[in-house]
Amino acid sequence: MATRLKDVDAVVIGLGFSGAILSRELTKAGLNVVALERGADRNPADEFTLTRLRDELRYAVRLELMQDNSIDTITFRNAPDEVALPIRRFGAFLPGEGVGGTGIHWGALQWRFLPTDFRIRSVLTERYGAKAIPDTMTIQDWPVSYDELEPHYDRFEKLCGVSGQAGNLRGKLISGGNPFEGPRSEDYPNKPIKTAVGPAMFGAAAASLGYHPFPVPVATSSAPYVNPEGITLGACEYCGHCNRTACEANAKASPNVNIVPVLRTEPKFELRTRAFVTRLNYDRNAKRITSVLYTDMRTGEEYEQPAGIVILSSFVFGNTQQLLLAGIGEPYDPSSGNGVVGKNYCYQFEAGANAFFEGREFNPFMGAPGMSIAIDDFNGENFDHSGLGFFGGGYIVCTNAGAPPIGGRAMPKDEPRWGVGWKQATAKWYRCSTGFNTQGSVYAHRDNFMDLDPTYKDALGRPLIRLTYNATDNDHAMSRHVVGKLEGVIKAMNPTRYEMHYRPKNFTVVPYQSTHNTGGTIMGADPNSSVVNRYLQAWDAHNLFVQGASVFPQQPGYNPTGTLGALAYWSAKAITEQYLKNPGPLVHA
């Protein structure tokens, strides 16, 4: 029997970026907020320290900050006619766990989506005709525009102290920035971080081919910075230990650094860790969530937390699972195309390369993911797709994120992989190689979706979420096109040798690719084709607001966090300025 707790104004499920932003905005509006986080507390003063963090084995290999698969995981299959099996160790993607979530271990690349990304179905129809879009491609326009989100993009960038170079400032193109970006109301809070040797060479080569190189925007401060919450961030130290771990200098943005410290001193906020939320108690007739059921993983005791507002801000898989378990919205059926919960799962389609320059020194042991130069000439609708046989695109980047001793040994594929020969090859090539990536879009497909697994359950007996996903012909054609453009730039850099790395035909969950999962609780203008409305309010439960990348209708060719943060502020504004005055549906179907 669950212990029923005292009512609160709002409960937040998952304290990553979205959960922290909503917690902050709701407490500022006078609400009492309880945040339920499944993982441990992660306090920078205790954990984000020098002697602790520069440990590649602990964080990059043994994945200390990631979700515990022994307690909860997902099952996976490539197609609906296959049997899904549990993922016993996350590989392709790495959901975070604990306060801060995936916002601790990310590389901090922070993009805005293109204005055309928000109305992609309309744009493709206008440019190429409605018949050009395959029936199996279930893309749809967002119910919110770039212009509506722009002030919230700006606010999130200031919260995170983003470093970058504006390319379009209030409609004026700025030399050195990204000329394809949507108009910005203000410049980035910080100047770009340093550019490494490899990316600088890439930028020069790309410019020689007529492309438009620019420094990648990154939520890592290039100089000491005080954000709007009054929190001081340090400057990047280019230590080479950034991905899959936290930041010892508090330069890389994370909820733990940029916003949670303020919440910890807020009397109206309470954080409960090791709180495994098992069910949203749903009153179908009233169309509202009455309470949240959770288990304290330290004691095994079960609690019921009643709340006036419920903010669901866990990872993509968790958000979708909670709605399916509670019976909120109609589950998606790929055979009929009916239903919405679980629909339009999308990933990120990445493929890269390595180039080797014998005798050239790149200092690979130093770096940060933002020490990158990119071109956006082949992203989204920045180029004409007529006659190409695919839609979508991606950005092309050369990076110097740091090459740690275990995973940072790039060598040509024909070199020995063990013994004396391997040691000699490592010594020869370690200092004189650089890496490249193409990060491409994934446009939603009818057969890529999530549902509840009929066989496998988590540690508390709930059905696991089942992921059905494979790359499409459109994805592969898009990637081959963009990788071909990358190869042209690499050739212009005149390397000693280089190797292109294409994606295999079938998606595999084993090697890491990207943690950029989207969809499952998509937003839209119509309850028949979406789970939440333009304010991220569930159509079938007016006091439930779903946050995060699970609301993306499809995946453009950019990292999702910038848009995730902008949507959090957009949703919070609607809750505090509209919903609290008159609780009920903010959009009527």
Image (cartoon, rainbow, N blue to C red):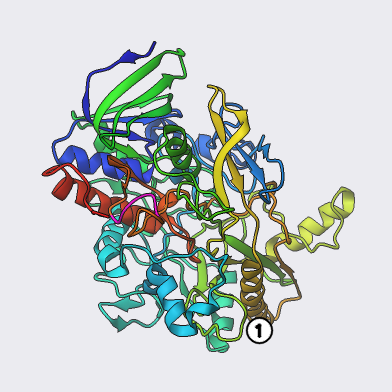
Dominant secondary structure of the residues highlighted in magenta in the image? loop
Whether residue 218 is situated above or below residue 168 in the rendered picture: above
- Residue drawn at point x = 65 percent, y = 60 percent: 471
Picture quarter containing residue 73? top right
Is 547 positioned to the left or the right of 470 in the image?
Answer: left
Whether residue 571 is situated above or below residue 452 in the rendered picture: below
Is 481 positioned to the left or the right of 358 in the image?
Answer: left
Whether residue 128 is situated above or below residue 588 in the rendered picture: below
> Around disc 1, counting alpha carbons within 10 Å, would you say few (fewer than 14), some (14 to 19), or many (20 or more)?
some
Range shown magenta = 530-534
Front residue of 288/92: it is 288
Regarding residue 110, the answer to whether it shows in the image is yes
Question: Residue 540, how many percent across, how many down?
Answer: 32, 43
Question: Residue 491, how many percent across, how many down?
Answer: 69, 81
Front residue of 33/63: it is 33
Question: Residue 96, how many percent across, how many down?
Answer: 50, 40
Front residue of 186/57: it is 186
Total marks placed? 1
Which amino acid type is marked by label 1?
Ala
Is 51 positioned to the left or the right of 436 in the image?
Answer: left
- SS class of the residue under badge 1? helix
Question: Residue 509, how many percent across, how many down?
Answer: 67, 47
Return the residue at label 1: 492
